[in-house]
Image (spheres, rainbow, N blue to C red):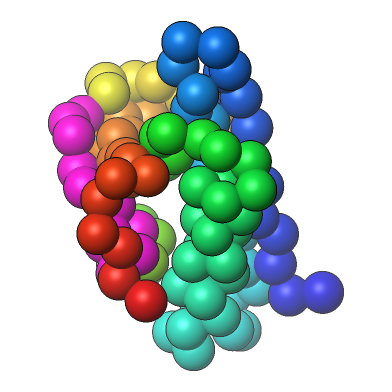
């Protein structure tokens, strides 16, 4: 196994949204694996799972993850300040989203 991907913080009824999270072993960065995995999970999220919205948060310095999200059609919505503690320190995160109605890159 070289990475993980999941949908979490699932909200149904009026929201029909969730968050996506992923990680990849550093030795496999830059090969397109995570972009492909995110696209496949979005196919599931908008197809079989019938979500309307998928959200993602990413620390501003993580340019690789930002590139994955943007290649997959996510749009940056803003900055959440000090939203998650990473290695003992609260960190800002850019918030991204993609809607079932958006034109996705394949």
Visible residue check, residue 89: no
- The residue drawn where x is 27% and y is 23% is 80
Total tally of numbered discs in the picture: 0
Give me the residue at 29% from left, 45% from top: 101
Q: Which residues are magenta?
A: 69-79
Residue sitting at the far top: 14
Residue 71 picture location, percent across and down: 29, 69
In the rendering, at what x and y percent does residue 37 appear? 58, 69
Q: Position of residue 14 (x, y in %)?
A: 46, 10
Q: Residue at x 56, y 51 (%)?
A: 47
Q: Between 56 and 93, which is closer to the camera in this rendering?
A: 56
Q: Tell me the quadrant of the picture where the N terminus can be found.
A: bottom right
Q: State which quadrant residue 56 falls in.
A: top left
**In which quadrant of the rendered view does residue 79 lie?**
top left
Please give left or right for residue 5 compared with residue 38 in the image.
right
Looking at the image, residue 37 lies above or below residue 27: above
The quarter in which the C terminus is drawn is: bottom left
Q: State yes or no: residue 29 in magenta.
A: no
Camera-side residue: 12 or 19? Answer: 12
In the displayed structure image, the side of residue 71 where residue 24 appears, left or right: right
**Residue 105 point in image, percent of width and height:** 30, 71
Q: Vertical placement of 90 versus 22: above or below?
A: above
Q: Residue at x 34, y 20 (%)?
A: 82
């Amino acid at each position: 196994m070289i990475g993980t991907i999941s949908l979490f913080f699932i909200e149904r009824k009026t929201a029909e949204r969730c968050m996506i999270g992923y990680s990849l072993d550093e030795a496999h960065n830059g090969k397109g694996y995570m972009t492909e995995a995110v696209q496949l999970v979005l196919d599931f999220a908008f197809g079989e799972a019938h979500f309307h919205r998928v959200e993602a948060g990413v620390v501003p310095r993580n340019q690789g993850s930002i590139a994955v999200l943007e290649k997959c059609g996510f749009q940056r919505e803003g900055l959440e300040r000090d939203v998650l503690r990473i290695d003992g320190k609260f960190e800002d995160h850019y918030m991204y989203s993609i809607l079932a109605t958006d034109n996705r890159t394949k």
